[in-house]
C-alpha cells in the first residue's frame, strides 16, 4: 500500500515537473525590445543618459536629493513626467531624472511598437436569437 502511494506521488511530481520545465511561447512572444530596454505596458517613453547625471528623489518639502549617479549610455523606462524643477522624468520607485538635453535624451515609442504591448480588445461576434416558428393554433 505504501509502495502504491509512493509511485502515485512520484508520477504526480514528474507530471508537475514537466509543466514547470516547458517554457510557454506566449511569454517570449510578448517581449518587445526598444533599444537596450524592454518596452512595458504603462511606459510613456525612455531616457538615454548622455553624460553622468544624478538620479533624484523628491523630498516631502519639494526639494530634490540625489539617490545615485546614472552612467553615460544607460537607458531607463519613463512612466511619468512632472513639471517641477524644470521637468522630471519618472523612472519608477519615486525616482526621477531631471530634464536636461545635454545630459539626458527623452524619446517616446513609435505607435507600431506601442501597439505590440497594448492589450488587444476581445471582439465578440453578436449571436442572432433563434428564429421563432409560428405554430397554427386552432
Image: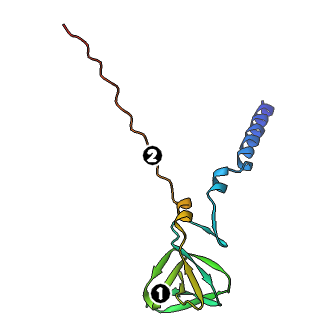
Point out residue 134 in the picture as x, y percentages from the top left corner.
26, 16
| Label 2 element class | loop
**Residue nearest the viewer, comparing 8 with 58:** 58
Point out residue 48 in the picture as x, y percentages from the top left corner.
61, 81
**Count of numbered badges drawn on the protein:** 2
On residue 123, the disc is: 2
Q: Quadrant of the C terminus?
A: top left
Q: Residue at the location (34% across, 30% down)?
A: 129
Point out residue 111 in the picture as x, y percentages from the top left corner.
52, 65
Closest to the camera, between mark 1 and mark 2, is: 2
Q: Is residue 2 above or below residue 107?
A: above
- Looking at the rendering, which quadrant does residue 70 occupy? bottom right
| Label 1 element class | loop
Direction top: furthest residue: 138
**Residue nearest the viewer, comparing 66 with 107:** 107
Residue under numbered circle 1: 87
Q: Residue at the location (58% across, 84% down)?
A: 105
Neighbor class of circle 1 (other Cα within 10 Å; few <14, some 14-19, many 20+) is some
Amino acid at each position: 500500500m505504501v509502495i502504491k502511494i509512493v509511485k502515485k506521488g512520484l508520477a504526480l511530481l514528474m507530471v508537475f515537473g514537466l509543466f514547470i520545465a516547458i517554457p510557454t511561447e506566449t511569454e517570449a512572444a510578448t517581449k518587445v525590445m526598444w533599444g537596450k530596454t524592454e518596452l512595458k505596458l504603462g511606459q510613456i517613453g525612455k531616457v538615454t543618459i548622455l553624460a553622468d547625471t544624478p538620479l533624484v528623489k523628491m523630498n516631502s518639502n519639494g526639494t530634490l536629493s540625489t539617490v545615485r549617479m546614472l552612467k553615460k549610455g544607460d537607458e531607463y523606462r519613463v512612466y511619468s513626467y512632472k513639471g517641477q524643477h524644470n521637468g522630471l522624468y519618472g523612472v519608477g520607485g519615486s525616482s526621477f531624472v531631471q530634464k536636461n538635453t545635454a545630459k539626458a535624451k527623452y524619446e517616446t515609442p513609435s505607435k507600431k511598437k506601442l501597439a505590440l504591448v497594448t492589450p488587444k480588445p476581445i471582439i465578440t461576434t453578436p449571436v442572432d436569437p433563434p428564429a421563432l416558428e409560428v405554430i397554427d393554433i386552432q
